[in-house]
Amino acid sequence: MKNKKIIIIFVVLFIILIVGGYFLINYLKQNKAEEEQPIVEEYTPQEEISEDQLRQTIVSLYFPNKETKELEPEARLVDIKEILENPYEKIVNLLIQGPKDESKEKIIPENTKLLSARNRRRLSNTRFFI
């Protein structure tokens, strides 16, 4: 009888150890996962963004390289208000101005004037004065 009591006590202690170990391992895994997550902090800019900066967008224009003759992009910062008013005229005028980079060549001849630029029913109509 004494042996049965001792065996039952050992079995109960063993079950308690197994269950306790399971919960301890899960707890430690959960804490480790929380520590590995990056802390997200709110970003505060050093200076406020002005109205003019908010209204600007980047436009990519393509000009041929002088040496390779392959088209290469050139980014321009443009006021979005100008683009919304008449996008075709603004883009063509930027192309008429030519590239800022010396390694690219102009695709529209000097002294070219844009008379009009429109887009109706998927058809673009651009008139120049050369």
Image (spheres, rainbow, N blue to C red):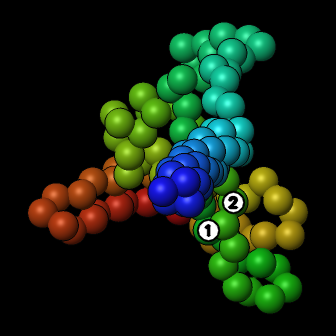
Please report the residue visible at 50 percent of the width from the left and 26 percent of the height from the top.
55
Q: Nearer the viewer, residue 33 or 101?
A: 33
Residue 96 screen position, x and y as percent: 59, 56
User: Dot 2, crowdedness within 10 Å: few (<14), some or many (≥20)?
Assistant: some
Q: Rounded to the nearest whole Å, what is the CA distance between mark 1 and mark 2? A: 6 Å
What amino acid is labelled 2 in the image? Glu
What amino acid is labelled 1 in the image? Tyr
The answer to whether 2 is drawn above or below residue 45 in the figure is below
Q: Nearer the viewer, residue 7 or 79?
A: 7
**CB atoms of marks 1 and 2 within 8 Å:** yes
Toward the left, the furthest residue is: 121
Please report the residue visible at 61 percent of the width from the left and 13 percent of the height from the top.
50
User: Dot 1, crowdedness within 10 Å: few (<14), some or many (≥20)?
Assistant: some
Please report the residue visible at 54 percent of the width from the left and 39 percent of the height from the top.
57
Please say whether residue 19 is visible from this viewpoint.
Answer: no
Residue 20 screen position, x and y as percent: 57, 45
Residue 76 screen position, x and y as percent: 65, 47
Residue picked out by circle 1? 62
Q: Which mark is residue 33?
A: none
The answer to whether 15 is drawn above or below residue 105 in the figure is above
Toward the bottom, the furthest residue is: 68
Q: Which mark is residue 74?
A: 2
Quarter of the image for residue 52 reads top right
The answer to whether 122 is drawn above or below residue 49 in the figure is below
Please report the residue visible at 74 percent of the width from the left and 11 percent of the height from the top.
47
Dot 1: element: strand
Q: Earlier in the sequence, mark 1 or mark 2?
A: 1
Dot 2: element: strand
